[in-house]
Amino acid sequence: MKISRELLTFAKEGLRTLVVCQKDLSSADYNKLDSNIYDIQTSEMPMAQKEEALARLYDSLEKELDYVGASAIEDKLQYGVPETIDMLIKANIKVWVLTGDKQETAIEIGKSCKLIQQDMRLEILTRPSVEQLDQELNRLGK
C-alpha cells in the first residue's frame, strides 16, 4: 500500500507523522455513539474504568476509516541532547529507550541523539499490535 510505504519512508528519516482519516456516520450511529459516551462519562465507575471503557468504544469505532492525508515534520532535538547522552554512555551509565513511536522512527531518533552508537548491540523488543493479533486469531480460526 502506497500510504504505508510513504509512512515508512518518513519514519526512517526520523520524522513525526500524523495520519488523518475520516468515517461517515449515520445520524442513528452518531446518536448511539453520543449516548454511549454520555452513559460512560456519567456512570459511577472509577475514572480509570471510564477511561478504559471510552478507549474500547473509540477503538470499536476506529475501523474501516477513509484515508484523507498524512503529514510529516522534523521534531528537532533540544540543544545539547546528543552530547549529554554521549557523556552518560561514556560514563558507563546504562541507557534504555521505551517508546510508543514507530520502530523505524525510534531508531533514527536514537541515532541522531547518539543514544544508539556504532559499537552498540541493538536489541529490539516488540509485541504484536492488536490488529496483528486479531489477524492471527482470524487466520487460526479458519
Image (cartoon, rainbow, N blue to C red):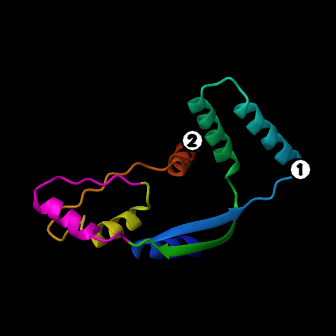
Residue type at tag 1: Ser
Residue that protrudes farthest toward the top in the picture? 44
Q: Quadrant of the N terminus?
A: bottom right
Which residue is depicted at the point 44% across and 62% down?
Answer: 102
Q: Can residue 1 be seen?
A: no
Residue 89 within the segment the image draws in magenta:
yes
The correct choice, above or below, for 89 with respect to 127 in the image is below
Q: Position of residue 135 (x, y in %)?
A: 55, 50
Residue that protrudes farthest toward the left in the picture? 91
Residue type at tag 2: Gly
Kindly identify which numbered label has been placed on residue 89.
none
Q: Position of residue 103 (x, y in %)?
A: 39, 62
- Local crowd size for mark 2, using a 10 Å CA cut-off: few (<14), some (14–19), many (≥20): few
Horizontal side of 41 relative to 90 (left or right) equals right
For label 1, the residue is 27
Residue 95 within the segment the image draws in magenta:
yes
Label 1: state its secondary structure: helix
Label 2: state its secondary structure: helix
Residue that protrudes farthest toward the right in the picture? 27
The correct choice, above or below, for 42 with respect to 86 in the image is above
Which of the 4 quarters of the picture holds residue 38? top right
Q: Position of residue 139 (x, y in %)?
A: 55, 48
Which residue is depicted at the point 34% across and 52% down?
Answer: 98
First in sequence: mark 2 vs mark 1: 1
Q: Position of residue 142 (x, y in %)?
A: 59, 44
Q: Which residues are magenta?
A: 77-99
CA gap, disc 2 and disc 1: 35 Å
Q: Can residue 43 be seen?
A: yes
Which of the 4 quarters of the picture holds residue 51? top right
For label 2, the residue is 141
Horizontal side of 7 relative to 80 (left or right) equals right
